[in-house]
Every structure is written in C-alpha cells, then in structure tokens.
Image (tube, rainbow, N blue to C red):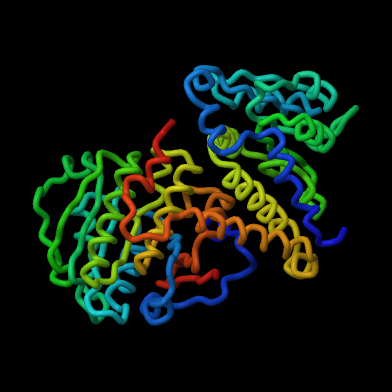
Amino acid sequence: MTPSPAPFKMNTSHGTGTPSPENDQRDTTQSEADEQPVILIADDQPDLVDLYTASLPDDYELRTAENGQEAVELFDERVDVALLDRNMPKMNGDAVLEHIRAEGYRCRVAMLTGVEPDFDILDMGFDEYLVKPISIPDLRDVVDRLLTLRKYDQDIQQYYAFLSKRIALEDSKSDHELESDPQYSELRETLAQLRDSFDAKQPDLDDVDPKALFDDLQET
Amino acid sequence: MILDTLSTLRSDPETTIPTERVPSELTEVSPILFLSPTSETAAEEASLALATTISVDQPNLLAVTFSHTPDQYLERWPTHVGPHELAKTVIVTAEDSVRSAATPDPSPPMTAGPLRIETVPNASTIVDLGTVITEYLADWADHSNHSIICLHSLTELFHHIKEPRIFRFLHTLLGRADRFDAKTYVQMDPTVHDAATVERFADMMDAVIEHEEHSQWSVYK
C-alpha cells in the first residue's frame, strides 16, 4: 500500500453519514437525549456477549448478534455505538464496519478483538480498537466515551479515531516496524494537521470575550 | 503500575533527571504534563520550582486546585523554590472546597507574593473555570507580567466531566495560554487512568514527565 491519502479515507466516509458539526450539536438535543442509548454488540462468543451485556448500565438498549450477518440485520439509524468482534462467522467485523460506513450511519464503532492490529487498520473506519481481554471498566469507559463523542465536532471524532489507531499500532509494533512504514509517518502527520486545524479555529485576538471561548463546552 | 500505564508512550523515556534538575532542564518548555499521583506533592513542587526559576522577573502564578483546599495547597508549598519570588499568586478552587476549609483566610508563603483566591461553583463548571483563567491571562499580559498556569489536577475533572469535554477544554485553554505567552503545567494521576487516556492528553503536550521513585522524573518527549 502506498502512503497516499487512501489510508485516511475513513474521514470522508464519516462525512457521508455524519452531519456537519453544527448539525451534530443540534441532533443531540432534547428528543434524542430523551431516548435510551442503543448499543449493538456483535461477537461469536456467547459468554463474552453475556459478560458485556451484564456489564453495561441498565439504561442502555442493547442489541446482540452472534455473527456479522445478524449484526447487519439488527442495524438501523438508532444504533449509537457498535462493539464489533473482527473474526465472526458468516460476515466478519471488518465487513460489518464497511457496511455501517457505506450506509452512512452516524454511530461510533469500537473493534473489540483478539486480532493484534496491523497496518491494515489504517484503512478502517472505526473509532476505537481494543485488544481482548478487555476489562469491564475499560468496556464501560469506551462506550461512555463514544456516546459522548457523538455530540462533538467531526474533527474531534477524527482526532480520537486516528489517535486510537496510533496507540493500537504503537502497542503492537516495534519502533523499527513503525519507523519503516510510511503509513505510520502519514498517520502522525495527519494527527499533527488535525491539531493545527484546532488551533486555527481559535481566535487570534487578545480581547475576545473569554466566556465565549468556552461557551460551547456547556453541557447539552 | 505507573510504568505499565505508560506502556503506549513511545519507547523508553528519553532521559531521567533528578528532581532538583527539573527547573534547569525544562524551564523553557510548555505545556508540560506531569504524571504523578494526586496524593504526592511532587508535581506541585516541580511546577513551583519551574515557575520560580523561569528567567523573567517575577511571573504571576495561577494555580487551579480541586484536589486540595487552598489551605492544603499552601501547606504543600515547598520551603525552597527557585531564585525568583512570584509577583502574585491566584488559587482557583471550587466553592465546596472553600466551604470545607478549616481556615477561611490562608496565609501565603513569602515566595507567593500577594494571594487571591477565586472560586468556581464546582469542578464541573469548566466554562467558569476557563473564563476565570483567561481573564487573568489577559489582565496580566496587559501589565507585562508573564503567567504560569498550574492545573492540579486534570484527574479531578474526570470525576465530574466526560473526557471529550475535558479534551476540548484543555485544548482551548492551551490555545489561550499560547496566545498570552503563558506557561502551562498540567498534572494527571497515572494510577487512575488507562494508558490510552494518558496518551490522548500527552499528545497535546511539549513534554511529558513522570515522577519515579528516588526523586527522579522520567522525561518522555
């Protein structure tokens, strides 16, 4: 694979299904806030599905699937977060993820998998990558974080997704492997560009109203 | 435990430096993430050592402390700091911390300069917190004083606020600090967070230093 923009097309595919940042904020106002968060869990190990469902708060609506095909059938626009195993019968987690992004669903996705990450994850449109075994606190944290991220601008979502890839690769690859792969360099460059884009949005003025700077952090 | 937490930070620390050399090694660096348990005083001591060593005349210090009351923060103030006294010190804390304080009017150490205490309703009101800090930065910049911001600690915010909001808050704050040429020292308790969380915040910093045993700091970038 060449170090082209291709590894990062996940960003633009999010754009297909994800409203603009302004819409993102508006979409998570009263009517949506009143609904239970919907979490889809897909894993071919029933004991793990049981563990995950027992560990998540009661106020989530949980949908469970034992293979990728079931996961696709259970999917609709109400799903907020999907937790996908990569190796599943009938349809693997990578294919489910591709389906989710191709259909333009706005949900955030975590891969919960026994597969050590390779550089192919740079092509994938997930938000988080966790290697099993996954602790219950980590599971709760990732679901909570992804639910919160739904409310934020696309650039923050992208930044978290890329950072998750960087962390996953740095966990599984040697320094030599990382340094010799141009896609890893490109990933770091993309992260730097995203940080710069955050900076560019900040007003370059001394006399800007301090409260206005932080106002968009009000709890919605 | 702490080293395990840091396993995803790239490779080994670049260097290890004893506590007393922190000021000379890192005086020009900002922002810095201090990884040190909230129960220990290492991050506060190192922050103050840096603040009082920076080669500008009498900087102002704005310390945010939700982990301790202003009294407790001042009690932890080290006897020996750097060569410069501070022009002014402002402690920003939560109203419930002040109400629980035994002494309503804490005495500042000599090196702190005149002391002022500001309160925000609680640690979850980050709009108020960001506003207070930014107002001081702007005011001090008008009077040609350099500013130091110490945030003790980011971990406390996690008890009240979800991570992406903290991320946005800190990013905005660092942007303002950069605009006003202020130095920013942020503490996180690495025994509380998973490695990925630490890494997401470390990514915003120019240096990450972790307190080790034997009065040493490991410098990670």
Res. A136 in view: no
Depth check, front residue: B150 or A50: B150
Q: Quadrant of the C terminus of chain B?
A: bottom right
Residue drawn where x is 36% and y is 63% of the image: B43
Specify the quadrant of the image occupied by residue B50: bottom left
Q: Position of residue B129 (x, y in %)?
A: 31, 47
Residue drawn where x is 61% and y is 47% of the image: A160
Residue occupying the far right of the picture: A90
Specify the quadrant of the image occupied by residue A12: top right
Depth check, front residue: B218 or A68: A68
In the image: residue B212, left or right of residue A88 = left
Q: Is residue A207 above or below residue B97?
A: below
Residue drawn where x is 43% and y is 63% of the image: B34
In the image: residue B4, left or right of residue B52 = right
Q: Position of residue A63 (x, y in %)?
A: 69, 19
Q: Is residue A57 above or below residue B73?
A: above
**Total numbered badges shown on the rendered structure:** 0
Q: Position of residue A27 (x, y in %)?
A: 55, 27
In the image: residue A148, left or right of residue A115 = left
Residue drawn where x is 60% and y is 42% of the image: A154
Depth check, front residue: A191 or A47: A191
Q: Position of residue B142 (x, y in %)?
A: 23, 67
Res. A61 in view: yes
Specify the quadrant of the image occupied by residue B24: bottom left
